[in-house]
Amino acid sequence: MISKNKIKYIHSLENKKGRDSQGMFVAEGPKVVADILALHKEKLRMLVGTKDWFDNNMKLIPKNAGCEIVEVTNEELSKTSLLCHPQQVLAVFEKLNTQIDINDIAKKLTLMTDGVQDPGNLGTIIRIADWFGIENIICSTDTVDVYNPKVVQATMGSLARVNITYMDMEKLFAIVPSDLPVYGTLLEGKNIYEQPLTDNGLIIMGNEGKGLSALSRSKITRAIRIPNYPEGRETADSLNVAVATAIVAAEFRRSIKY
């Protein structure tokens, strides 16, 4: 059984203010919870699940002294969950330590989100990065909170494997190496399928409606574009930012055979 106070506490983490003040976030569903537990078990603070889930997942339950285990009925889980359709289990985790080493930015491919606002898009971008072995994502300060429950859900567990940090863009560009390739998708960019691509660099993906900010545009050294087919045909104005990220990441990995 779960108390009203615990339900109230979990619901307070639906809002950024609550997450920031508590330093916690909520993950829901067997896959998301299991993936985060696999790598960040020490961050677990509360595990709320049905009897069926606990019976089938005893090996996942940590022995943390600071972790509270609560068994609930399906009805109680519905009252506790932040989802429309609860999925057997939810967990409260302490926020992950995902600071990025600036040296990694110079050596590897790094994604950057410039004002991405839709939680589903950010979550999908994190999942894409995980798939293509991009270990680090830098988010501008006006990007949606990575611990928003909808972002966490959309990552499908990839949040556990990708380092995500928020940085002021001017401060970021002040410390990255001057010779680091900075890629951005622009309508006036060169066809991505006809360009030599590097195995390191910063790939900036812009806001859903406004695209890249003026600051980002000014820092791009290699403007690229994803051509429509056939080129010149009247078509959609743009691609969804998560879809575009997938295409760009796939082409980088294909072209350098990594």
Image: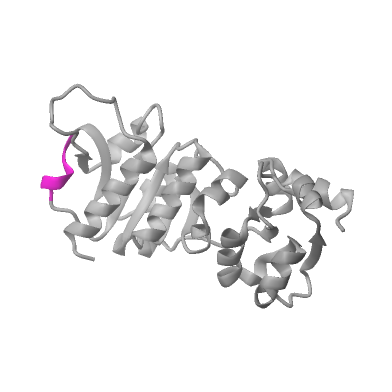
Q: Is residue 96 visible?
A: no
The number of numbered badges drawn on the structure is 0
Highlighted magenta segment, given as a residue range: 189-195
Q: Residue furthest top?
A: 234
Q: Quadrant of residue 116?
A: top left
Residue in the foreground of this view, choosing between 159 and 164? 159
Q: Which residue lies furthest to the left in this view?
A: 194
Query: Residue shown at 50%/36% (left/top)?
Result: 118
| Colouring rule applied to residues | one colour
Q: In which quarter of the image is residue 85?
A: top right
Residue 171 image position (x, y, % from top left): 43, 46
Residue 71 image position (x, y, % from top left): 80, 63
Which quadrant is the N terminus positioned in?
A: bottom right
Residue in the foreground of this view, choosing between 10 and 81? 81
Q: Can residue 26 be seen in this view?
A: yes
Query: Residue shown at 81%/58% (left/top)?
Result: 72
Residue in the foreground of this view, choosing between 20 and 85? 85
Compared to residue 229, the image places residue 179 above or below, namely below
Query: Residue shown at 84%/52% (left/top)?
Result: 6
Q: Quadrant of residue 38?
A: bottom right
Residue 206 image position (x, y, % from top left): 37, 37
Query: Residue shown at 77%/65% (left/top)?
Result: 51
Taking the image as shown, residue 198 lies to the left or right of residue 49, namely left
Taking the image as shown, residue 138 lies to the left or right of residue 119, namely left
Taking the image as shown, residue 50 lies to the left or right of residue 237, namely right
Residue 75 image position (x, y, % from top left): 80, 49
- Say whether residue 11 is magenta: no
Which quadrant is the C terminus positioned in?
A: bottom left
Compared to residue 137, the image places residue 108 above or below, namely below
